[in-house]
Image (cartoon, helix red, strand yellow):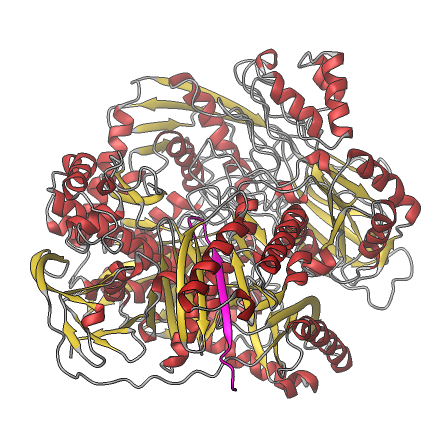
């Protein structure tokens, strides 16, 4: 190793820091709650070929590969001869961006001493893009909102005002969206400034040397991990609720000498409703599942992602093509890791978790003054979006995580903040006992939520839940997680997906799913069972019937709780 | 004044308790090992030492100011009292569910930190307030009494109360507090509406729980300390440094001990701010590097940057999100696992990684010769010639260069095909880059450009790395003050009496209510002033008004400072103009046509800052003569060069030395890189600038 390699080590660290700064600038200036509260965004730096060199670690594995591939599409669509200093490009193309119209991706070419040296890209999930609004109800992408093909947002520093006017005229919250678009442009600009500072400090004319250093080391490290795996293949499967008909994901994972292929042949075809997934988004989650299992600490870049390949028949649920509706592509996407784990567990047993809640338990409420009686003068209309999580699957050595997102990594919003966003009341948000699948390692608990409106309001709830009919399945003898339930407080039935009316005075009572268990519950350690009982993670009945805790042990635990002791 | 004022500053740190006595302008310091079982013992020991040096009796001390890591450690080590929480029905698990996210995306075996109180220690009562502070569901004594009866029967010593929206309407929390006082008169009670009246239930509940958890411990410690000091003849008032960089009475500290968290590092920031004032510097980056961590803080206009929430007890490589949030006024610092003891290894990408694992004091870095086999930052510093093996810590310890070289070769060099010196260079570069990256990200989060900043470095390891850090950050000027080793304790003596009161109340500019604002700010002002008046009966008390504003729909507020006149005669046009002005400064452009809202209101009451005499900056008055030369690794040429060694005490005021030079003193060593020139200032600071 030579001195210059010490400099390259420093530069690699620096580039990762540059993209973290880039992402941070976006969080600070964004308007959409999905970006600033939940962290649904991504940012990266690329060489002039469009190869991703570094990417910020944010809440969204789904953006990983999508972002890695996006810049190449931009270079092709814009044309190399048409790239100028001061340009900013934009798209929300689900197939060349990050999977649905609600993600805006922006790319900025970076020039140093008059020459193109690289690109910065960032993407963010915005709250509204027009059309029917965020939900699964569209029959085609045309109904899902405004489509912006890859084009210039600014040329040589000059913003395209025609585009701005078209965007403004087509969305429900024009100021917010334009604000978010400018925030995306700002964040690329911050990345660019830091990159140029680094190039001046190290007296670099281009990124060729550092790019080769990053990509070579990442490729070698990734291939070493793959080489350490058995050469074999296995098939995994998972079935989920879908919109009104169940969807099956089937995946054959094959470990080759220098790559791992996930083949989704045999999965369900495209759905009529907007829960279809473009291939790039499914690829991101398949790749995430394998990478988190075998190479978690290798940073994401073109070379570390390349060995993870995906195949899927055109017009399958994971390879929906234009004009299929794709707004809620995250639901299918979030199930992909569980399907991949079901296969990979047969290749390397004892590494991956049991199934978990999989998709986020999100809902949006559209509140308005009551229509069945006199509404108070201050009653108003409001849109409130919330992000919530069920339990994650138990791991070979650890219980699943209670009410924690996996594979997504986004955050929930504080109840007190949500209640300021509109006349909504969250009556309950707490852990759901007995919802974690039984096992030697217990599945993570889901959660209860109850939502209503303030006096004088009624609302529609846009449900985006799964696992109502298909709870998480256990591994190696572990039990199922509890399924999702949703009902009104007067007993009226509700569906797991779609827009549904809730009358004045009613509440929606929801229970989000638990993760599944791992291993036989009979093998669970007595200390863990007693702790779970003391905390109320499990009921007395579960402790006795499923885990076989003796009546005297149960009495001892209950006595300790009465005395305020930890167990 | 006929009599010189005598003041004592005491900082209890993880390893050492630092004591500084100032008699007029003369100061005496002592470092004694922290005595964990009875921390007051080290204080008494240190106080006796400095009093002996100064030749005074403890009864002559006029004021004692104390900061401590004990509150932080009690939270990190979970050594608190038997504590229960009473919260709103339906929200029993707020402190356990956190943000429902994973702070590390790429770890299948991630475990989340346990909440301070297990689920069976969390009780619920009915009743509910809404987001405008109106009662949605009533709460009666009859609802509360059976719950308190259970808690009393279980024998809890301390009870936290946190109810939804209590920052807007505290009636229900106060009622629970009354019932607790009646039924459990001996228990300590903490209400979230008093400890941290801010929106966001996770942060507020966690803060009140943390306060309740450490309250019995801290109350008992402070009582014992006061008793011991009185026994020694101390008659003066005793005050505590708080997390926000000000001073509160011992009684307030015992009531709100969570405000003592990170008071030591806060003292360091105040120390740096005081030096900034001496030099009239408006933009300063303070850099405090010790044995296990480095702390970086932005100081603008001689005032450390503050924040309303921070994270304590990070459990996972200092990673953001892996600790517990505490929402109290605090000096905003970034802390990373980079200190003299931080250990290096090579990862799967054949990249050198440093920290956050630390060698601690046992076995210590390899060069301590106590069995450490992994290379630490100090080992790299030794091999690179930055440290003198025979003169470490004033010659109290001889360092073993061969052991350092072996550890570097074994762990880094053999894998990466590098010799010991190159391995050391790689290690030092990586740790410096880690710190530089942390500083850069912190600056961006605050919308600052570091190239306009001056760095002030203190703490044992900082002067070895600060020069290189300045090169990496494009910082032109660096000051290394005297007393760098006991900087926090000196900082305590420079801090004003202050207390910040704040409240979450939503108001849009469209719904601007001047009368409500006036009443609210007056209320906060009297609360904050009351605390300060308890500490200082005579000084004038200044009020600083701040509101946190944003565009409706954004999630991040920016702090807007108002003059007393702007605050007390609120006018919507002024509020809007002040917001737009600061927003454009931070983010480049305003966003037209959006409503603006105010989320948090804050009044900081403070005694006036000590007037600081500006230091004259002498130009080069001669060159300091090195008493020897040694081989020092120069990153600029990536090789060893011959560098002069100058004793700090030998440098006359105004004398200069060109880098590469090593300036040595008992407490630390200052490295002057080849790009810099150092000047000794009248106050003892080493002032390092880019060579002309």
| Residue B580: percent from left, percent from top | 54, 79
Q: Is residue B476 magenta?
A: no
Q: Is residue B15 magenta?
A: yes
| Left or right of B3, for residue A559 | right
Please name the residue shown 29% across and 42% down the image.
Answer: B343
Q: Using the rendered image of the protein, determine whether residue B277 is visible from the camera's viewpoint.
A: yes
Quarter that holds the N terminus of chain A: top left
| Left or right of B217, for residue B6 | left
- Which residues, given as a range, are shown in magenta? B1-16
Task: Give the mark count.
Answer: 0
Residue A206, quarter of the rendered image: bottom left
Please name the residue shown 45% across and 57% down the image.
Answer: B46
Residue A483 vertical position relative to residue B158 in the rendered view, above or below: above
Residue A46 vertical position relative to residue B506 in the rendered view, above or below: above
Quarter that holds the C terminus of chain A: top right
| Left or right of B152, for residue A292 | left
């Amino acid at each position: 190793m030579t001195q210059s390699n010490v400099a390259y080590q420093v530069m690699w660290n620096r580039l990762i820091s540059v993209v973290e700064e880039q992402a941070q600038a976006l969080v600070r200036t964004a308007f959409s709650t999905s970006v600033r509260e939940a962290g649904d965004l991504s940012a990266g730096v690329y060489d002039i070929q469009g190869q991703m060199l570094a990417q910020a670690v944010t809440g969204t594995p789904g953006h990983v590969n999508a972002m890695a591939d996006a810049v190449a599409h931009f270079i092709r669509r814009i044309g190399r001869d048409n790239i100028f200093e001061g340009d900013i490009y934009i798209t929300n193309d689900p197939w060349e961006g990050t999977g649905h119209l609600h993600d805006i991706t922006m790319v900025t070419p970076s020039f140093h001493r008059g020459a193109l040296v690289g690109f910065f890209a960032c993407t963010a999930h915005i709250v509204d893009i027009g059309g029917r609004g965020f939900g699964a109800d569209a029959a085609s992408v045309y109904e899902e909102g405004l489509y912006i093909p890859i084009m210039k947002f600014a040329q040589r520093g000059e913003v395209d005002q025609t585009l701005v006017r078209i965007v403004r005229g087509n969305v429900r919250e024009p100021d917010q969206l334009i604000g978010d678009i400018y925030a995306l442009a700002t964040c690329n600009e911050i990345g660019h400034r830091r990159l140029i500072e680094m190039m001046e400090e190290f007296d670099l004319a281009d990124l060729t040397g550092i790019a080769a250093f990053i990509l070579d080391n990442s490729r070698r490290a990734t291939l070493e991990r793959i080489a350490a795996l058995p050469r074999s293949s296995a098939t995994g499967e998972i079935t989920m609720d879908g919109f009104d008909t169940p969807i099956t994901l089937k995946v054959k994972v094959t470990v080759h000498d220098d790559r791992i292929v996930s083949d989704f042949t045999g999965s369900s075809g495209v759905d009529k409703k907007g829960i279809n997934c473009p291939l790039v988004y499914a690829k991101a989650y398949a790749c995430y599942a394998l990478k988190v299992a075998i190479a978690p600490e290798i940073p994401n870049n073109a070379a570390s992602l390349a060995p993870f390949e995906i195949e899927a028949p055109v017009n399958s649920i994971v390879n929906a093509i234009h004009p299929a509706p794709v707004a809620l592509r995250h639901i299918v996407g979030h199930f992909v890791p569980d399907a991949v784990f079901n296969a990979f567990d047969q290749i390397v047993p004892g590494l991956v978790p049991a199934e978990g809640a999989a998709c986020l338990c999100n809902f949006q409420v559209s509140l308005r003054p009551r229509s069945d009686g006199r509404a108070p003068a201050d009653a108003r209309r409001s849109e409130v979006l919330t992000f919530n999580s069920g339990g994650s699957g138990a791991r070979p050595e650890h219980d699943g995580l209670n009410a924690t997102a996996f594979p997504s990594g986004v955050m929930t919003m504080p109840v007190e903040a949500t209640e300021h966003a509109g006349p909504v009341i969250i009556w309950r948000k707490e852990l759901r006992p007995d919802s974690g699948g039984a096992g030697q390692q217990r599945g993570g608990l889901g959660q209860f939520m109850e939502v209503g409106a303030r006096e004088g309001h009624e609302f529609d709830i846009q449900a985006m839940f799964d696992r109502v009919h298909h709870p998480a399945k256990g591994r190696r003898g572990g039990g199922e997680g509890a399924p999702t339930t949703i009902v009104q407080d007067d007993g009226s039935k509700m569906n797991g997906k779609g827009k549904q009316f809730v009358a004045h005075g009613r509440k929606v009572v929801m229970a989000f799913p638990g993760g599944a268990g791992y291993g036989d519950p009979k093998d669970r350690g007595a200390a863990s069972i007693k702790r779970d009982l003391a905390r109320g993670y499990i009921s007395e009945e579960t402790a006795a019937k499923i885990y076989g805790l003796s009546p005297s042990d149960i009495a001892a635990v209950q006595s300790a709780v009465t005395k305020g002791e930890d167990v | 004044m006929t009599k010189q004022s005598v003041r004592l500053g005491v900082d209890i740190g993880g390893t050492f308790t630092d004591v500084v006595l100032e008699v007029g302008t003369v100061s005496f310091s002592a470092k004694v090992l922290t005595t964990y079982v009875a921390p007051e013992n080290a204080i008494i020991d240190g106080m006796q030492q400095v009093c002996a040096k100064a030749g005074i009796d403890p009864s002559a001390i006029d004021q004692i100011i104390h900061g401590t890591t004990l509150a932080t450690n009690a939270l990190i080590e979970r050594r608190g009292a038997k504590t229960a929480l009473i919260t709103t029905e339906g929200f029993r698990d707020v402190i356990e569910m956190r943000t429902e996210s994973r702070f590390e995306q790429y770890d299948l075996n991630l475990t989340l930190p346990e909440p301070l109180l297990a689920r069976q220690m969390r009780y619920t009562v009915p009743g509910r307030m809404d987001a405008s502070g109106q009662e949605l569901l009533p709460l009666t004594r009859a609802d509360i009494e059976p719950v308190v009866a259970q808690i009393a029967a279980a024998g809890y010593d301390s009870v936290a109360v946190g109810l939804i929206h209590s920052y807007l309407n505290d009636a229900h929390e106060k009622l629970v507090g009354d019932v607790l006082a009646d039924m459990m008169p001996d228990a300590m009670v903490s209400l979230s509406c008093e400890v941290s009246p801010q929106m966001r239930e996770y942060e507020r509940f966690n803060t009140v729980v943390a306060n309740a958890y450490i309250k019995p411990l801290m109350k008992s410690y402070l009582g014992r300390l006061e008793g011991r000091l009185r026994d020694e003849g101390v008659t003066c008032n005793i005050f505590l440094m708080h997390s926000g960089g000000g001073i509160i009475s011992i009684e307030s500290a015992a009531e709100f001990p969570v405000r003592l968290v990170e008071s030591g590092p806060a003292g360091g920031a105040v120390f740096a701010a005081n030096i900034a004032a001496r030099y009239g510097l408006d933009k300063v980056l303070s850099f405090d590097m010790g044995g296990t961590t480095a702390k970086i803080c932005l100081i603008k206009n001689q005032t450390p940057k503050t924040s309303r929430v921070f994270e304590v007890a990070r459990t996972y490589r200092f990673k953001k999100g892996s600790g517990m949030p505490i929402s109290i006024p605090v000096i905003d610092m970034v802390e990373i696992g980079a200190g003299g003891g931080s250990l290096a290894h090579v990862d799967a990408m054949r990249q050198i990684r440093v920290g956050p694992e630390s060698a601690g004091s046992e076995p210590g870095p390899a060069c301590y010769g106590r069995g450490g086999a992994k290379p630490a930052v100090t080992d790299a510093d030794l091999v690179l010639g930055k440290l003198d093996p025979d003169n470490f810590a004033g010659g109290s310890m001889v360092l073993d260069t061969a052991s350092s070289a072996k550890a570097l070769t074994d762990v880094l060099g053999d894998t990466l095909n590098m010799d010991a010196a190159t391995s050391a260079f790689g290690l030092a570069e990586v740790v410096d880059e880690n710190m530089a990256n942390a500083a850069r990200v912190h600056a961006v989060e605050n919308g600052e450009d570091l190239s306009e900043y001056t760095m002030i470095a203190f703490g044992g390891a900082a002067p070895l790395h600060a020069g290189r850090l300045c090169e990496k950050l494009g910082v032109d000027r660096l000051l290394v003050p005297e007393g760098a080793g006991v900087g926090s304790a000196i900082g305590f003596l420079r801090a004003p009496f202050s207390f910040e009161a704040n409240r979450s109340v939503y108001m849009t500019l469209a719904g601007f209510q001047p009368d409500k604002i006036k009443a609210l700010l007056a209320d906060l002002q009297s609360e904050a002033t009351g605390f300060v008046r308890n500490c200082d009966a005579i000084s004038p008390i200044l009020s600083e008004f701040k509101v946190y504003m944003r565009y409706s729909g954004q999630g991040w507020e920016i702090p807007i400072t108002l003059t007393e006149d702007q605050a007390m005669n609120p006018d919507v046009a002024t509020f809007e103009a002040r917001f737009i002005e600061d927003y454009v400064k931070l983010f480049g452009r305003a966003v037209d046509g959006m409503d603006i809202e105010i989320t948090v209101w804050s009044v900081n009451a403070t005694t006036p800052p000590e007037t600081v005499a500006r230091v004259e900056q002498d130009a080069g008055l001669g060159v300091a003569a090195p008493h020897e030369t040694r081989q020092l690794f120069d990153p600029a040429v990536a090789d060893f060069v011959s560098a002069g060694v100058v004793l700090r005490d030998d440098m006359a005021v105004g004398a200069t030395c060109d880098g590469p030079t090593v300036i040595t003193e008992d407490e630390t060593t200052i490295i002057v890189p080849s790009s810099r020139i150092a000047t000794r200032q009248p106050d003892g600071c080493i002032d390092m600038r880019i060579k002309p």
